[in-house]
Image (cartoon, helix red, strand yellow):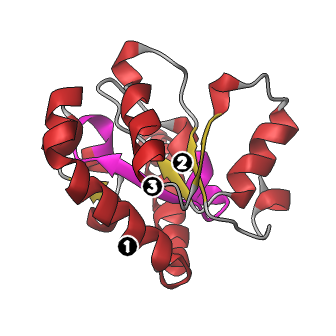
């Protein structure tokens, strides 16, 4: 994804996951209604080529997840590789994989009902993150390096085999 790393960013927030109940796309769609100053794109709402998808990732400032099921989270990882800030719940594999500054409290999106109770907290978190995007890029790059080393390479396996 190197060719997408230094693209100009816009106030774009992506939902890069498949549309399935456990991904809770309805939370993302509701956020779009409550944060009209930002562009929200559900990638699966369109038939994107790989290049079109990567261009969206490269232009996005934020990649959002409210997932209730996740094993590795490749799309959020891809976002970090092109300097998009991952915003993930503190649950599932995300708890182990992401630094504190990229996780929000799990209860904010445990269900749509919980989301409604915490909507203002999540909205504020998104606005703060988007407003301070430039200050977070270095942290995103560090996060990407950590994810690559710890979860998306065979380095530890090779060390163990040797």
* Eye-nearest disc, 1 or 3: 3
Q: CA distance from mark 1 to mark 3?
A: 12 Å
| Residue, disc 3 | 35
Labelled disc at residue 128 = 1
Mark 2 / mark 3, whichever is N-terminal: 3
Residue 72 visible to an observer of this rendering = yes
Is the C-beta separation of discs 1 and 2 under 8 Å?
no
Q: CA distance from mark 2 to mark 3?
A: 24 Å
Residue at 43%, 52% (x, y): give it. Answer: 150
| Residue, disc 2 | 77
Farthest-out residue, top: 21
Circle 1 Cα neighbour tier, 10 Å, few/some/many (<14 / 14–19 / ≥20): few
**Which of these two is toward me, 91 or 153?**
91
Q: Report which quarter residue 152 is drawn in.
A: top right
Circle 2 Cα neighbour tier, 10 Å, few/some/many (<14 / 14–19 / ≥20): many
- Residue 148 vertical placement versus 51 (above, below): below
């Amino acid at each position: 994804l190197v060719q997408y790393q230094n693209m100009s960013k816009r106030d774009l927030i992506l939902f890069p996951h498949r549309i399935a109940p456990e991904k809770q796309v309805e939370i993302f769609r509701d956020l779009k209604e409550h944060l009209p100053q930002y562009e929200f794109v559900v990638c699966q709402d369109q038939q994107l080529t790989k290049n079109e998808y990567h261009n969206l990732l490269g232009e996005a400032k934020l990649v959002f997840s409210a997932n209730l099921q996740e094993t590795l989270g490749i799309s959020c990882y891809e976002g970090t590789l092109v300097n998009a800030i991952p915003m993930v719940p503190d649950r599932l594999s995300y708890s182990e994989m992401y630094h504190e500054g990229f996780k929000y409290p799990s209860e904010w999106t445990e269900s749509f009902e919980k989301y409604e109770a915490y909507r203002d907290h999540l909205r504020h978190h998104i606005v703060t993150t988007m407003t301070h995007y430039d200050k977070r890029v270095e942290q995103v790059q560090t996060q990407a390096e950590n994810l690559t080393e710890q979860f998306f390479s065979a380095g530890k396996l090779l060390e163990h085999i040797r």
